[in-house]
Amino acid sequence: MPQLSCQNLTLGYEGKTIVSGLSFDINAGDYLCIVGENGSGKSTLMKTLLHLKTPASGQIVTGDGVKSNEIGYLPQQTAVQKDFPASVREVVRSGCLNRCGLRPFYSRQEKQLAEENMAKLGIFSLAKRCYRELSGGQQQRALLARALCATRKILLLDEPAAGLDPKATEEMYELIARLNGEGTTIVMISHDVAASVKYASHILHIGGGSALFFGPKSDYIRKNVSCGGGTYE
């Protein structure tokens, strides 16, 4: 059973339809990149997958043991978030808040999970550093570790390399690919089509109010090359 199944979704806001008839499945271990022009509905779709927005019609069904409040999310950062005055350890631990329920403290297991995720993403030595003092790449690693604390099954990432320099961008993509290789399902919005076809297993291309393509990246590359879209390196 798919971890997420989108069935005939219509998305929009303020009575305006952005995209309609959107249907696709995300299975365990997939690496799905969502691409399309600005305003095509990528971010609206992401918020809908997170149940932050309600579709105008259609439904999203979770399966394979995934609960709607157990999806890790890495949003695009705002200027205010980049200046957050907390330690890296505090930021990463906050990913466990949904696990805490009414408890006003983190359990030993939750604290250990945060330590493990910081180590996994190479920022354990930064645990006591103030988050706002970190480089852009280090901040993104901290936020990715935070998202991992919410779930080990599926991560939704909104332009995770936005604003990073080329070296940090490549490191971020490689890190996400490694997490996917370890079994985490990835759903990522990206404007970087070349990186998408390099790392993704599947592509969802939306535009003009509908899905222009959904399927394996090999079919996406073949379709674009046959239509004169060039090659991907």
Image: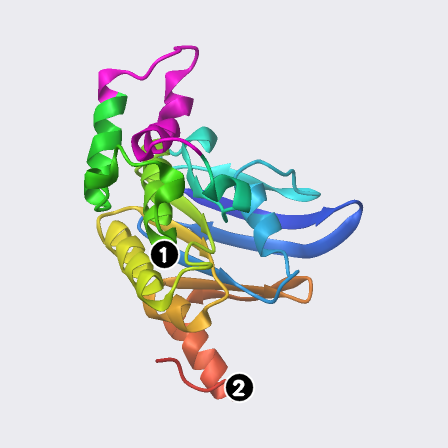
Residue at (58, 56) in percent of width and height: 42
- Residue identifier under label 1: 31
Q: Nearer the viewer, residue 154 or 82?
A: 82
Mark 2 to mark 1: distance in Å?
Answer: 24 Å
Q: Helix, strand, or loop for circle 2?
A: loop
- Identify the image's colour scheme: rainbow, by chain, secondary structure or one colour: rainbow
User: In the rendered structure, does residue 104 fall within the stretch colored magenta?
Assistant: yes
Residue 9 marker: none
Q: Type of residue at label 2?
A: Cys
Q: Residue 233 location in percent, x, y?
A: 34, 80
Residue at (37, 46) in percent of width and height: 139
Residue at (49, 40) in percent of width and height: 81
Q: Is residue 233 left or right of residue 10?
A: left
- Residue identifier under label 2: 227
Q: Type of residue at label 1?
A: Tyr
Q: Please provide the residue range marked out in magenta.
A: 85-109
Q: Nearer the viewer, residue 51 or 62?
A: 51
